[in-house]
Amino acid sequence: MKVSNQEIANILYEIGEYLEMQDVAFKPRAYEKAAQTIESLAEDAGDIYKKGGLKALENIPGIGVSIAEKIEELLKTGKCQEHELLKKKTPVDLANLTKVEGLGPKKIKVLYQKLKIKNIGDLEKAAKAGKIAALEGFGEKSEQNILKGLEFLKKGSGRFPLPLIMGNIMELRNRLKSLKDVERLEVAGSVRRYKETVGDADILVISKNPKPIMDYFVSMPEVAHVYAHGPTKSAVKLKSGLDVDVRIVPEESYGAALMYFTGSKDHNVALRELAIKKGYTLNEYGLFKGTKEKKGKLAAGKTEEEIYRVLGLEYIEPEMREMTGEIELAQKNSLPKIIGYGDLKGDLQVQTNWTDGEKSIEEMAMAAMKIGLEYIAITDHTKRLAMTHGLDEKRLMKQMQEIDELNRKFKIKNTEFKILRSTECDILEDGSLDLPDEILKKLDVVGASVHSHFNLSEIEQTKRVCRAMKNPNVDIIFHPTGRIVGRREAYNLDMSTIIKTAKETCTILEINGSDRLDLRDQYIRMCVDAGVKMSIDSDAHNDSQLYFSGFGIAQARRGWATKNDIINAWSVDKMLSFLK
Ligand code: DGT
Ligand code: CA
Ligand code: CA
Ligand code: ZN
């Protein structure tokens, strides 16, 4: 039987909590400490026991004889008699109930004895019925707190769209990074892979003095709940609902830990298997010579690069670690050179205060210049979108004049920056466009997109978008599938037909970097394979939103796009001459 450190730790935590219910002195704390120790052990407790028996378990700091015996029992039978007995006495879902802010073992016991509350569902029912307020020692306020805590747990059970949460995560990262005891710090997991949504944030730290870091981490003002506070692992829930954990890892294992906690899990599993084939053992502590049973010398561990190298692989970017063929290509040294985060020269979807944006054309241009871009396209909505005050022919003509004047002004100031005359022209239900061809012809670049009739059948919707692509003036289809991460599904489209038609008509498909993240990665990959070019845009409605393109780049990287696939990674002249 294989019992993991985490499983042992969870049982020890529970025994401690049950003992606390019984008002036992000291012991609860001893179990909690033992659980933290086991949770953060570098080696499997099972391996330690196999090598040195009960004595070896007792030798782990903080583990006394009686707890060591319980661990032995767990390793042998998968169960612990005392834990079972305690659980029988108070058969509640301790693991989940203790997640509710403010609910400790003692209160959980009272709730069980007085109201037969066993789980989160029972708790919610009782609180909503006002039964908890009536209990001695609880009251109105504590019932309200329980309800709030439950609300919070629910919020936390979902996943977070990366563009909405990344700012918070980066701010937190920078704050932790600036602590004086932090030598290195990185956010691993799905955040480092820039997945569209993240479940939680996994932070790795090298430090010789972790205590002040952990003390700071669990007492930050935005912390709503502390799950664990230990010397090598701490975990909290933030008020936003996001779970964050921090692990301290040894310097010599940093690369291995980073690799492990970056994932994806499937990628890790494949690397482990490859390591075994080559006579190594790979885990979060390093790449070791030999097998698990006869583990030998550390062969690599400090950096990811050296681990990949020893395994005979080219370095694989985190965004590509999804088990979609990256390992095979890395073995042949033929991974594509994916687009980099600094590679965009322009932004082809920017709105202004002519419609639903907040800033003027000039302000958006200045902001773009400031972040190092060479050109932007002004793409305000068109008249059908009346609520955005969409542009009709007359106003678009006026806007073009203003853009020409601004470009002249830049030229006089000797800046190379260029504002392109453009539009986000509405695609009508039948695939015709909201503006006549004569005016579209006057623009430098024409974007078109669907903002209505999302419920057409796949055949109708596909036909509609294809008709728009066939218009010789339409250069780009913006947010091609209409999805919004976590909020709206894509409309029905046959993407193979869309991509085929894009290729035939030389139409660009957008990768929208705002919370739409549309195209998604597998469609990007299809475009790359089909030779369909794409643009990566911010869809900024404000001068502070231009950085959204970064999420589009992440998306493109997960779709294996190179600079050559993305037209706004090109100079303005090359880009314009490529258009229809
Ligand atoms: P998330 O948090 O759901 O957005 O996704 P991840 O990928 O951040 O997953 P998480 O936080 O559960 O775990 C972080 C990384 O740790 C994961 O990407 C790979 C690694 N990992 C977690 N569990 C396992 C496991 O059972 N086996 C292996 N090989 N790796 C694991
Ligand atoms: Ca994670
Ligand atoms: Ca995690
Ligand atoms: Zn739009």
Image (cartoon, helix red, strand yellow):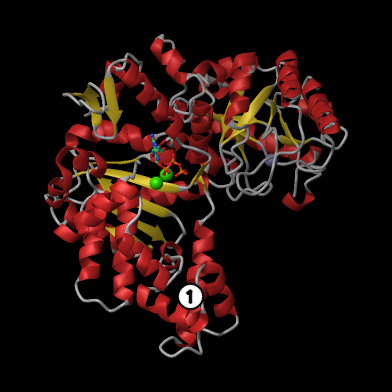
In the rendered structure, the answer to whether residue 140 lies left or right of residue 211 reads: right
Q: Residue at x 60, y 32 (%)?
A: 520
Residue 257 vertical position relative to residue 326 in the rendered view, above or below:
below
Q: Residue furthest right?
A: 430
Ligand 4: quadrant of the figure:
top right
- The residue to which callout 1 is attached is 146
In the rendered structure, the answer to whether residue 580 lies left or right of residue 4 reads: right
Q: Nearer the viewer, residue 145 or 409?
A: 145
Residue 7 visible? yes
Q: Nearer the viewer, residue 173 or 363?
A: 173
Q: Position of residue 426 (x, y in %)?
A: 77, 37
Q: Position of residue 44 (x, y in %)?
A: 25, 41
Within 10 Å of disc 1 (Cα), the crowding (few <14, some 14-19, many 20+) is many
Residue 279 vertical position relative to residue 113 in the rendered view, above or below:
above
Q: Nearer the viewer, residue 391 or 95?
A: 95
Q: Position of residue 129 (x, y in %)?
A: 60, 82
Residue 220 visible? no
Q: Residue at x 59, y 79 (%)?
A: 128
Q: Quadrant of the C terminus?
A: top right
Q: Secondary structure at mark 1?
A: helix
Q: Residue at x 24, y 29 (%)?
A: 286
Q: Quadrant of the N terminus?
A: top left
In the rendered structure, the answer to whether residue 77 lies left or right of residue 67 reads: right
Q: Amino acid at mark 1?
A: Ile
